[in-house]
Amino acid sequence: MNTGQNLYKKAKKLIPGGTMLLSKRPEMFLPEKWPSYYSKAKGCHVWDLDNNKYTDVSIMGIGTNILGYGNKEIDEVVSNVVKTGNMSTFNCPEEVYLAEKLIEMNPWADMVRFARSGGEANAIAIRIARAASGKDKVAICGYHGWHDWYLSTNLGNDEGLDQHLLPGLDPAGVPNHLKGSTLPFLYNNYEELENLVKNHDIGVIKMEVQRNHAPKEGYLQKVRKLATDHNIVLIFDECTSGFRETYGPIFKKYGVEPDMTVFGKTIANGYALTAVVGKREVMEAAQNTFISSTFWTERIGPAAALKTLEIMEKEQPWDYITEMGNYIKEQWNSIASNNDLEINTFGIPALAGFSFTSKDALKYKTFITQELLKKGYLASTVLYSCTAHTKPIINAYLDELNTVFQTIEKCEKGALKIDNLLESPICHGGFKRLN
């Protein structure tokens, strides 16, 4: 019936861009064919508006639900909040209990501020860090949201926007006087960061600890020392990497501690909650500026996060999703090799991805989504693992993917033309990451 696509056509007339999140635009998956909207979600399954059931082997709500969609225990807590009241003139006590929990898992830290989205949490962190350092300039490595402070990185870039962060996005609406206030550096390139610090009055270093590649030996330690030696506030953005490989931040693996860290996505298993955690001497600078919002005081987010952390601490899901992610990467490589195709895998295991070494890479990506959708899978070239992804579910997906790879092999060898197989326009490309 294609109800989702029909609704999306209406949405594009009513909502600029059609959706609230770039990564969920149908054009990022299968233009003109993607179901676009859901009626319900449970475990790793999603139902569209025509009640078609799909297995989500793609982005799992942009990586928000490592305990699966609709976790019963968390949903029961949220249902009780709805029954007893989500908002009042008083504050919810859960925010205090949650702050205690986050400091307990981050003993280097002393204080916490909460928000509801990753972009605003990162903006809060930058505001506090600038207030604490007394300096304006920020060195960044990674994806940290959409606010002016961040997108100003793209101002005055002579080589074109594709060289920095978000290909094809113009920083329209960002004041031009912010040019030069946020400066990018490439991951694992310590010399580039060191030169930024030497040549600019850097007050804040903000970076993702790990996404596509592991840090080189000693890299994070050198970044930490550089920040300390120059009185720079060091922020590790764990919005995406948090709780994927440890109980809390991934930087625990490397024995390095920042001055601040930011959590999001997984912390409340699909409910809106983000947190800025930091050392007292930095965090108290929040009192010297103005950071405040009505809906940061609602109760659902903190209540869901408390229950999520309780379940995580008990079940340690990061072990399972890491094991599953490694298995998926191994199988992707095996399937590609068996079909004489070249791919590159990337990402921490729980956020695994692959790309084709081919001029037709985006066409092949579109074809995978097209063909697997017919088989009942939401699929792309990334797979964000969750605890609902059982081995039988993943193996069934891999069997279907192998069939698609067999066709792609014929295209690569000239026996078929991929253009003749596509039933929609080619999907759009994603972010180009600094790390």
Image: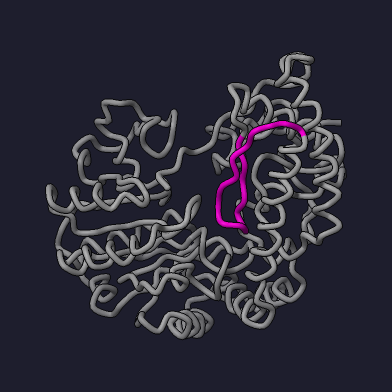
Q: Quadrant of residue 280?
A: bottom left
Say whether residue 91 is left or right of residue 390. Answer: left
Taking the spot 74% from the left edge, 76% from the top edge, the residue there is 73
Question: Which residue is at the front of the view, 374 or 435?
Answer: 435
Say whether residue 310 is left or right of residue 167. Answer: right
Say whether residue 200 is left or right of residue 212. Answer: left
Q: Position of residue 127 (x, y in %)?
A: 28, 60
Q: Position of residue 169 (x, y in %)?
A: 42, 31
For residue 153, say whether it is visible. yes
Taking the spot 75% from the left edge, 49% from the top edge, the residue there is 56
Say whether residue 144 is left or right of residue 379. Answer: left
Q: Position of residue 400 (x, y in %)?
A: 84, 40
For residue 6, say whether it is visible. no
Taking the spot 87% from the left edge, 38% from the top edge, the residue there is 375
Is residue 349 a member of the stretch shown in magenta?
A: yes
From which residue to which does the magenta span run?
Answer: 339-355
Q: Position of residue 199 (x, y in %)?
A: 12, 47
Is residue 153 a member of the stretch shown in magenta?
A: no
Taking the spot 73% from the left edge, 44% from the top edge, the residue there is 334
Q: Quadrant of residue 415?
A: top right
256 over 389 or under it: above or below: below
Question: Which residue is at the front of the view, 314 or 265?
Answer: 314
Question: Which residue is at the front of the view, 157 or 145?
Answer: 157
Q: Quadrant of residue 63?
A: bottom right
- For the N terminus, the quadrant is top right
